[in-house]
Amino acid sequence: MQVQNQRNITVQKWVVAISIVLFALKILAYYLTNSVAVLTDALESTVNVVTGLTGLYALRVAIRPRDEDHPYGHGKAELLSASLEGVLIIVAGLIIIYESLINLQHQHIVQRLDAGMIIIASTAIINFGLGAWCIRVGKKEQSIGLMASGKHLQSDTWTTVGIIFGLILLQITKISWIDSAVAMISSIWIIVEGSKILRNTISGIMDEADQSVIEQVIDTLNQERPDNWIDIHNLRTIKFGNTLHVDCHLTVPWYFQVLEGHDEAAKLHDVIGQAFDHHVEMFVHLDACLPPQSCTICGILTCTERKHPYNGRLEWTLENVTKNARHGLSVGVDQA
């Protein structure tokens, strides 16, 4: 766990350092070309630097252990950082639109486009590679902060590519308003990407259910379930940083003693933990089966307390596992 956290911080440090270098290169390109489209790229790079620094701080906060004031840890600091990144990207897009409109009214001479395009093309290649690295590590470590940084860096790459094509067109046609038009198109793309990042982080802050995670948990349980797990319901998941919290109700035979029930809950934790690369914290509420209703879906065929024949295994689905309907008896069963 500690190794994973340090890896995330190391990646973010590289993001900050490289973003500062790329920002300096883009400012140089703007100085050489006097192009508002190149200024667009440079303004977005200021966002990269600011959000890189805040992201680094957020990762340091997120790895702090739980305390009395934060019983679930500090993982949501990454969400706040990613939210700030989304807001700043949108603001940068709006500023670019403003600068483009000003340039349309008071056009200025664009110069030395060859040198400028070479510089920003090199930054695009570096940005794309850095973004791909962030996304890959972020997915592996379940770090929404790193994934947000990676997506932003890659969106920055595509806006840069668009700007380069626009500058080529400007150099060929000598039509001055193309510079502002390219900047405006790029700004719209930037605002859309910033909105997506903001939407995802707001979902995390509001604890919106991640259906893909829940489905992965359910698939794992269906594959690994022993007969003693008669039913699972009221399943909920939530992520704090790179820790996955899972709550559920597990139905076991009514005659199990406390130690036996605890062993089944521990097995359930181990199954979920092995299915996910990141840390899993699980809270399991044990329910006793209810003969004769539960007998219809209970696969313990040697049970001496059986009150009804076994009709077939209840296949756990997103519909019945996440509901609070005990034993899922309100839905059908698969016939054995």
Image: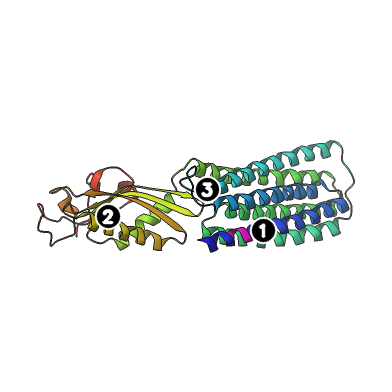
Q: Identify the residue under disc 1.
A: 13
Counting residues from the N terminus, which is met first, the one under dot 1 or under dot 3?
1
Q: In this orientation, does residue 207 appear? A: yes
Q: Position of residue 236 (x, y in %)?
A: 38, 47
Q: Identify the residue under disc 2.
A: 315
Counting residues from the N terminus, which is met first, the one under dot 2 or under dot 3?
3
Q: Position of residue 106 (x, y in %)?
A: 87, 37
Side (left or right) of 80 relative to 207:
right
Disc 2 on helix, strand or loop? loop
Q: Nearer the viewer, mark 2 or mark 3?
A: 3
Q: Nearer the viewer, mark 1 or mark 3?
A: 3
Dot 3 alpha-carbon crowd within 10 angstroms: few under 14, some 14 to 19, many 20 or more? many
Q: Which residue type carries mark 1? A: Lys
Q: Identify the residue under disc 3.
A: 74
Q: Position of residue 145 (x, y in %)?
A: 58, 52
Residue in the image at 60% along x and 53% along y: 60
In this rendered view, identify the residue nearer to me: 249 or 153: 249
Q: CA distance from mark 2 to mark 3?
A: 36 Å
Disc 1 on helix, strand or loop? helix
Q: Which residue type carries mark 3? A: His
In this rendered view, identify the residue nearer to me: 316 or 7: 7
